[in-house]
Image (cartoon, rainbow, N blue to C red):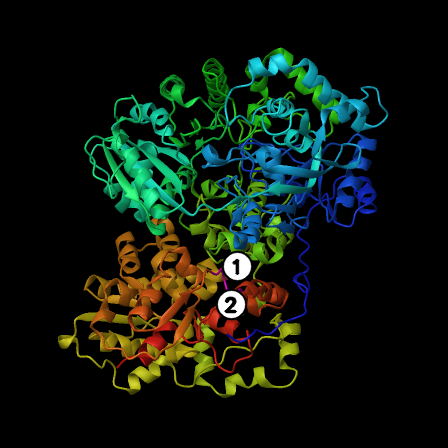
Amino acid sequence: MATHASGSERDPREGGNFEYTGGEVERPDLVDALDRRVEGDVRFDDYSRRLYATDASAFEVTPIGVVLPESTADVAAVHEYCFEEGIPVLPRGGGTSLAGQTVNEAVVLDFSKAMDSVIDVDPEARTARVEAGAYVGDLNTAVEPYGLKFAPDPAWRDKSAVGGAIGNNSTGSHSLKYGKTDHYVEELEVVLADGTVTTFGEVAVEELRESADPEGDDLLSRIHAEIVRVIDEEADAIDERFPEMKRNVSGYNLDRLLAEYRGEYGEAGVVNLGRLLAGSEGTLATVTEATVSLVEIPETKAVALLTYDDLLDAMEDVAPILEHDPAAVEVMDDVLLGLAADTPEFAEVVGMLPEGTDSVLLVEFYAEDDETGRRKVADLVADRVDGAETVADPRPGAAETTAQPTRARHAMEAHDDDDRARFWKMRKSGLPILLSRTSDAKHISFIEDCAIPPEHLPEYTREFQEILEDAGTFATFYAHAGPGVLHIRPLIDTKDVDDVDAMVEIADRVTDAVVRLGGSVSGEHGDGRARTQWNRKLYGDDLWEAFRDLKTAFDPDWLLNPGNVCGDFDMGENLRFDPDYEFEAGFDPAMQWDIENGMQGMVELCHGCGGCRGPQETTGGVMCPTYRAAEEEIQSTRGRANMLRGAMNGELPDDPTGDEFVTEVMDLCVGCKGCKVDCPSGVDMAKLKAEVEHAHHREHGASLRTRLLGKFEDLAPLGSRFAPLSNLPGKLPGAGLIMEKTLGIASERDLPTFRSESLVDWFDARGGAGVPREAADRDVLLFPDVYTTYTNPGAGKAAVRVLEAANCHVRIPEVKGSGRPPHSKGLIDESRATARDTVETLAPDVEAGWDVVVVEPTDAVMLQSDYADLLGGDASDLSDDDVAAVAGGTFGVMEYLDAFRLDEDLSFDAPGERLAYHGHCHQKATKKDHHAVGVLRRAGYGVDPLDTTCCGMAGSFGYEAEHYSMSKAIAEGLFEQVDGSDADAVVAPGASCSTQLKERDDTAEEPPHPVEKLAAALA
């Protein structure tokens, strides 16, 4: 496809003055001192400190400030100065830690902004060198062309930094094959506590002895001395107290150090000091660059899903299943399956399970070819399920592989990519629902990843269930049964002092069980604030002191992420929501919030996983377009949620409806609704923004531009009536600059062109419906949205032609519009008034059997989704039944054709043309964007559905001068995908999307709506 134009040279901040900071600056003297020493940004303002006060854990600690280093020299300068001044330092990547490792009262070093490159790949050596802030997903993208990957696969690998994976010693679902990150650390560039930059890699212990000096003047000599001492004096304690578990990441990595010294991983007497840092959580040194080894991507995979009548039966089966050498064994209990069954995407899969199924084990095998994969599944099923049939024949004697009695009741197989992906997605489907609770009680991550020898899993599960019952709560049991790591998140209300006490008691009793059964307190998510205090119970006093001595040798003043691993944290303190937590929005919500705790529940919903920070290339989806363009935490859904919660609970000394907060925090949210579907918790930031903007307008008044843009449904009929005269002002020389100076409309944008003959005019002129009602199969109200009616009637005409070809009787109702323009500007009173009139007009016809069909996607979603917020419950005097009837009876035009398969009775003669399809973000948020693809393909077009985020126009957003450059920056991702497609043309259903795409290569015409392509193909 044609190469797109480069676009504007404006800086995204220009005009809007977006600094991504705000409030008072803490410790300006420290800011000045660091600013003189580093090239990266130094941010000690209230907003930045609030943004980095949380991670994906239950904890919250406001940092001293934030530095965004651009080089190792920056990191060393921060370390050196803070060492001299006694100031703690904390390295941070994606902020996805579940145990609170990346929140502390320290100067935070955010590596994910500028130190995030894959520096070099050596496919022959199977190694890669990366900066600490590079995401694991980006690393895998860089090495995939060579048939390689970074073996550890944490769940959030496309948002988790390699430095974080090292700091946490991360692993993942396939640890049975690959183990932990430490195994793949070859060499690390690190900065020591005092700012010394050095390299940690393989070294002979005898060399360490030569340089060791416990009283030395430099840190390295003291570090070497302590490492030698651990090897010489702590070997017996390490052998005795360290769990014999592949998945132990508690404490410091002393067992790996000792094993390397003994020659268990290579030459005896040689250790890799980089691997000692794996799992140290930034408490020993700060990693800036890493050389890691890679593995070959498996040729193929095969999956079996075994069903059980009881969770304990499944746990009993784990040990015998491991004898079949699987790559992964994942468990889902009845709670998780119930959640998946309530999800339309997985209801069909769960419904295929035999009646009475309580739990399942997902078992995956790696294989060199498909035949071997099928055979491995057949062997497993023959061994574990009585009388089950399999695709392949098992080996002779496979049924006697283990001596354990069979416990599984049924088996399902998955051998192609789609089926395997569906099983795995089902396994992951329940967690988002667990995390979507808007109540005060939430499923808290604090004891969720203990590692237990698989043979003891039944006993551990039984005891854990008893502990939960004694505490009066429950949890779901799921995840990595193969290596003995069950994810268990009890339901706890940390705002209640009794529940906090219960949380600590649960952790204490579970730790006792873990130690007794030979397990580890953490098998995956690390120590942090949640589990550091239990390491003493796990390892005993002697090793606890050895940990502390090692920490002191590396960090004599305990300034590196102090308190973690072997510190004095109390898991009941520094909770994000604690018994002293208070919430005051400062205004009454204008819309209906039909969730527990109302709008407050939504404000508090984000759990901090960082799902909104995933790059387009590795994560896909819609969320979050402004973060992807700016790579600023404040522009992520997580950032906005943290800021909004902080402003409403008093942690942030700012008014959530004040000018600064609305401008810096909420204004760049484009309202794409991507977070509603892509966020694991379903945070609806678009709706929250509308509430905040509405409250701001009520308190401060709306600007002239806001009022004009919000009245587009009133102004567009006038523009059409007086066209073409109404289009002249935008074409006059200098008009753009005048519009920018007076109204803030970007001078680079062409204003919408009003058509003198509107869609309604055309429809009336042709004599109305072309198919008499008495002869039609269906009755359709073609909704006259403002864009289709007055600026793009061609799409409306095409819709009429296609609908009538499908024997639909079409009528255009007399309505003003959907109310989308005022709603998008936070003018909720105006949008509610329009919505009320629209429902009053449409409801009688809908109840009489008419379907409402909308050409413009955002207007369709307005009726389908937003009306319930505006008109439901006590929000209006309308009947909820009428509102629900209109919502349920409304369809986007391509959705309508696909849902009722109306196109299947039509004759098409499509040209041999391949189309790149960019779906509208509001359709994606409601999972309706796929319909156009199916219809176009059945019509004979080749279709390349692009996995894109918002186009960047977002209604009027891209027209506004201060947003223009951000709008174009967002569009770059879309343009790149279009350019990379082998399609002949691009189609887009949204008017905003077409406007943006028109500027991609300065074409004279906007890309057509899919229904226009469909109409053109009618035979």
Residue 933 x/y as whole percent:
35, 66
Residue 816 located left or right of residue 842: right
Would you say residue 951 sits in the magenta stretch?
yes
Snapshot quadrant of residue 25: top right
Query: Could you say which disc has been placed on residue 670 in the image?
Result: 1
Span highlighted in magenta in the image: 948-957
Which three-letter amino acid code belongs to the residue tagged 2?
A: Gly
From the viewer's side, name the closer residue of 637 and 300.
Answer: 300
Would you say residue 469 sits in the magenta stretch?
no
Going from N to C along the chain, the mark reached first, 1 or 2, is: 1
Most distant residue in the front direction: 396
Snapshot quadrant of residue 569: top right
Residue 683 x/y as whole percent:
46, 46
Q: Which residue is mark 2?
A: 980
Residue found at x 51% / y 51%: 147
Residue 743 located left or right of residue 519: right
Observer able to see residue 615: no
Residue 384 x/y as whole percent:
27, 29
Against 61, residue 455 (above or below) is: above
